[in-house]
Image (cartoon, helix red, strand yellow):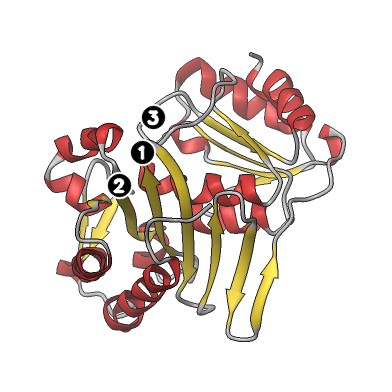
Amino acid sequence: MTTPIDISRLADCLRLAAKTEILPRFRNLGTDDVRAKSEPTDLVTEADEAAERMIRREVAAIAPDALFIGEESVAADPGLVGRLASADLAVVVDPIDGTFNFASGIPAYGVMASVVWKGETVAGIIYDPMGDDWVVAEKGSGAYLRKASGDQRLTVAVPTSISEMVGMASAGYFFGEMRERVLGNLAKVRFVASYRCAAHEYRTFGGGHVHFIMYNKLMPWDHLAGTLIAQEAGGYVARFDGSAYLPHHLEGGLLAATDKDSWEMLRREILEI
């Protein structure tokens, strides 16, 4: 489909912010440049805020009529995220996904943006500043790894039995009895990990390197770009109850798998729903 925003310009905007505001601060943050938000591991840095300001200015030039929703903008104005459901056109941005890694000097972080048009995610971009490349998807057009040497189409992994599955699960946001149940049931798969960075987890899934990814906390800047990429790479994505994941959803969990049969098996064996 035709996306109402020039995706190449938006991708270049993410790269510019990374080159200008993020990379120069990587492993160069001072003590006062890092702050905790909701908890000690939920961090924001000067790089997050400066990058979001730059991206916001660039998006205003590319799409002046678009609602801009950034993670740090919502931290300052929590009511902003509620406007996403009724917006005709919105750009949703995570200036640094994996801020904990970034602040720790771990080179696993990314810059993400998605385009929401009339309540539907129609484009997603995940830029890796360390590798200087993008994973990009537009609805109905496939998912691609885009780098200087050209584009490579992405395809999810071949389905396999649960005992052979390798996956990603963000266990930190499962709580109480559900946490115990899910963590115990994950012993049924071959291997499970977490990069503490949805950007790289979605890239890994879309590239066919893992069989599933699972999240319980839903914020649009963390998942809109990645879920579209996962679907355009051939994967099956839904909330834990089997319903479609929409841009305004803030709860309900999220599971992506290589196909619907694998998704159903994981829901049954891991989530026990």
**Mark 1 surroundings: few (<14), some (14-19) or many (≥20) residues within 10 A:** few
What is the C-alpha distance between the residues marked 2 and 1?
6 Å
Q: Distance between the residues labelled 2 and 3?
A: 17 Å
Residue position marked by numbered label 1 in the rendering: 118
Sooner in the amino-acid sequence: mark 1 or mark 3:
1
- For mark 2, what is the residue? 89
In the rendered image of this protein, does residue 12 appear above or below residue 272?
below
Q: Are marks 2 and 1 in contact (CB under 8 Å)?
A: yes
Rendering coords of residue 72 (x, y %): 21, 53
- Residue 249 is marked as 3
- Residue for point 58% across, 85% down: 148
Query: Nearer the observer, disc 1 or disc 3?
Result: 1
Q: What element carries label 3?
A: loop
Q: In which quarter of the image is residue 96?
A: bottom left
Q: Position of residue 99 (x, y in %)?
A: 36, 59
- What residue type is disc 3 on? His
Apparent side of residue 146 relative to residue 58 in the rendered image (left or right): right
